Amino acid sequence: MQYGLNVVTLGDYADPRLVVRLAQAAELAGWHGLFVWDHLAFAWGVPSGDPWVILAAVALATQHLKVGTAVTPLPRRRPHILANTIATLDLLSQGRVILGVGLGGVPEEFTAFGEAGDARERAGRLDEGLEILNRLWSGEKVTLRGQHYTIQDVALAPLPVQRPRVPVWVGGDSRPALRRAAHWDGWVGGGDDEHGQMIKSPEQIAAIVATIRQHRVSSQPFDVALTGASQPGDNALVSDYAAAGVTWWLESLHGYRGSFEELEARVLAGPTKVVGDKD
C-alpha cells in the first residue's frame, strides 16, 4: 500500500503556499504522494487554485513525493497543451507525476464558458484526448484527424522522464469509466464524503476491482487509489480496503475537516498503515 494526500484545492487551499506546507509536512512524515483537485470552482463562486501551478510548487519543495491530480477533467483541457504541461512537470519533478483523468463532474465548469456540458460528448473528448497524450508522450510524430481534435505531423518535446508514459489513472464509478480505466494504469475513486465518513464499503471496492479485471488485458501493474478519512491508529480501516484491492490510500484534506493547524497535525502524524506494513 502507498499512502498519499488528496488536497481539495478550493477555498483557503486555493493558495499554493498552504499546499506546499502540507507537502513538506507529508514528506517528513512518510507519505508517498500528494494529489490535488482540478476544478474551475470560481465559476460557481468558490476560489479554486490552478493544479499545475500548485503541483509545480510542490515538486520544487519536495524530493520524493509523487504529485498528481485526482482528477483532471480532460474534456475541458486542450490535450496537446496538457501533454506539454505534464511532460514539463515530470521533468521538473524527475519522474514523479501521476495523471488522474475523468469526464468532469460539474457541468457548469463547461457551460459557463460556452463549452458542451453533454456527458456523451465529454466522453468522446476524454477518449480522444487520452490517445493524444499517449501518442505525444511516445516522442513519435503524430498526425490525427479525430472527431474532436486534429494534429498534423507534430512531435512533442521535451518528453516525460517516465517511460513509456506518465501513469494515467481514470476516475469514475460507471461501467464505461471502469472499462476505460482497465486500458490505462489505474483507477481512482472517492471513498469518503465531506463529513469524513466512508461512503464506499470494502465490498463495493472489491466489486469495482473485479469489474476492472474483467476488462484488463495488460499484465502490467495496476493501481487502485481511494480517497478516505482516517485517524492515526485506525489500521483496521485501511487494512480492510487493502484487502479489497486498494493500492493507494489518499487521505482527504479540506476545509470541512478542520483548521489548517489541525490538518497539518494529521499529516505530521503520518499515514494510517495497513497492519503489517513497515515504516
Image (tube, helix red, strand yellow):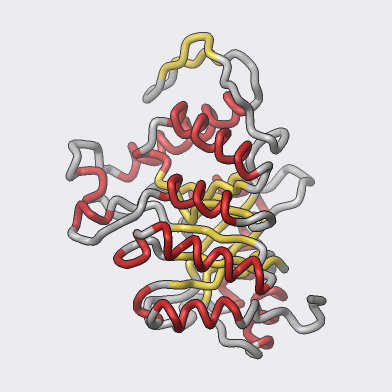
The residue positioned 20% from the left and 52% from the top of the image is 43
The residue positioned 75% from the left and 51% from the top of the image is 221
The picture quadrant where one finds residue 112 is top left
Q: Position of residue 120 (x, y in %)?
A: 34, 41
Q: In the figure, is residue 258 to the left or right of 214?
A: left
Q: Where is residue 26 in the image (x, y as percent from the top left)?
A: 60, 69
> In the rendered image of this protein, does residue 80 appear above or below residue 142?
below
The picture quadrant where one finds residue 1 is bottom right
The residue positioned 63% from the left and 27% from the top of the image is 159
> In the rendered image of this protein, does residue 47 appear above or below residue 140?
below
| 77 or 214, nearer to the observer | 77
Q: Position of residue 218 (x, y in %)?
A: 74, 43
The residue positioned 45% from the left and 52% from the top of the image is 54
Question: Residue most toward the top?
Answer: 153
Q: Quadrant of the C terminus?
A: bottom right
- Residue 175 visible in rendering: no
- Residue 72 visible in rendering: yes
